[in-house]
Amino acid sequence: MRAPRVTLDQWRTLQAVVDHGGFAQAADVLHRSQSSVSYTVARMQEQLGVPLLRMEGRKAVLTEAGEVLLRRSRLLVAQAGQLEELAHHMEQGWEAEVRLVVDAAYPNSKLVRALSAFMPQSRGCRVRLREEVLSGVEDVLLDGSADLAITALDITGYLGVELGAVEFVAVAHSAHPLHLLQRKLSSQDLESQLQIVVRDTGQHRPRDSGWLGAEQRWTVGSLATSVSFVSSGLGFAWLPRHLIRRELEDGILRALPMIQGGVRRPQFHLYTNKDKALGPATQILMGLITAQNADPLAPPGR
């Protein structure tokens, strides 16, 4: 790829001429001589081989090509400024990226609110969000691939910040044979029915979660697939209430009338990578995630 012939300083000079109404005005803003500004723009046109300005009386106005190139150059100059600003923040210890791994059962709405609040404070810091199931979150944290982790599992050797509970409800399609029994259900009633479970994405310490007493059991790759299967009449499952709120309201799914154990409320925690010092961006995001769960006015979401 050919190296650029025109410098960022030249593009900034052209922008100043256009934005401030002429060479003299641009010279005042840039603290340069008018002859220096005029030479810079003339040299640009020579290097590009395209006229950027034309004279109308004593006023320089953009040509059609100049309008196109100037518009594109504004993005280029802005990105260069952002790059320099990011380098400055990194020199002060600000991270270039925060890596967050989250159990797929954790409500997305809480993450969206936390990340929306983080964006104006991020100073260009990127967020790399990764979803896992059960021990998959633990694996990612332990192998050093995450700075922050949200899971309902107790991770040995780590102290987490409590984020509150997520309610899982035993449900089946409204026309499922279990509902047709029209009575309270025991675990024996479930044993002959198909249970849908979500695969643990962990490789090193996979764990079963919840009741797995059904003789028939199908394992799927995501909570979304589990919701789809159960909503179509395929089996029963314990599903996060926030993911099936609409199906429950529409009567597609109904909670199973269990004698006991029909609802589970695992507590979720926020863990940090204890082998890495927390940078300022990570600390800010951690505080925002925690604050979302402390906010009593935060609306429930999917």
Image (cartoon, grey):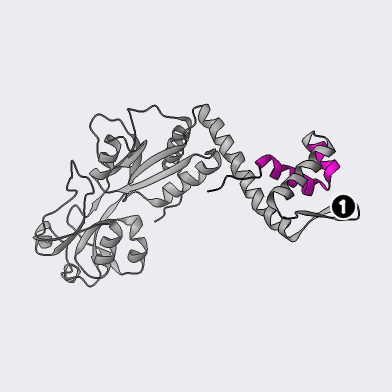
The percent coordinates of residue 20 (x first, y second) are: 81, 46
Q: Quadrant of the C terminus?
A: bottom left
The percent coordinates of residue 59 (x first, y second) are: 87, 52
Asked where in the image residue 64 lies, by quadrant, the reply is bottom right
Asked whether the viewer can see residue 263, the reply is yes
Which residue is situated farthest in the right direction here? 57
Asked where in the image residue 62 lies, by quadrant, the reply is bottom right
Asked whether the viewer can see residue 297, the reply is no
Could you tell me which residue is drawn at 25 percent across and 61 percent down? 226
Which class describes the residues within 10 Å of circle 1: few (<14), some (14-19), or many (20+)?
Answer: few
Could you tell me which residue is drawn at 68 percent across and 57 percent down? 68
Which residue in the protein does label 1 denote? 59
Is residue 30 positioned above or below 215 on the image? above
Q: Which residues are magenta?
A: 6-29
Asked where in the image residue 144 lies, by quadrant, the reply is top left
Front in this rendered view, residue 75 or 118? 75
The percent coordinates of residue 69 (x first, y second) are: 68, 54
Front in this rendered view, residue 32 or 140? 32
Residue 39 lies left or right of residue 126; in this view the side is right
**Magenta stretch holds residue 117:** no
Front in this rendered view, residue 125 or 223? 125
Q: Amino acid at mark 1?
A: Lys
Q: Give the main secondary structure of the magenta stretch.
A: helix
Front in this rendered view, residue 58 or 245? 58
The percent coordinates of residue 190 (x first, y second) are: 13, 61
Is residue 254 positioned above or below 238 on the image? below
**Magenta stretch holds residue 14:** yes
How many numbered badges does the structure rendering display? 1
Q: Secondary structure at mark 1?
A: strand
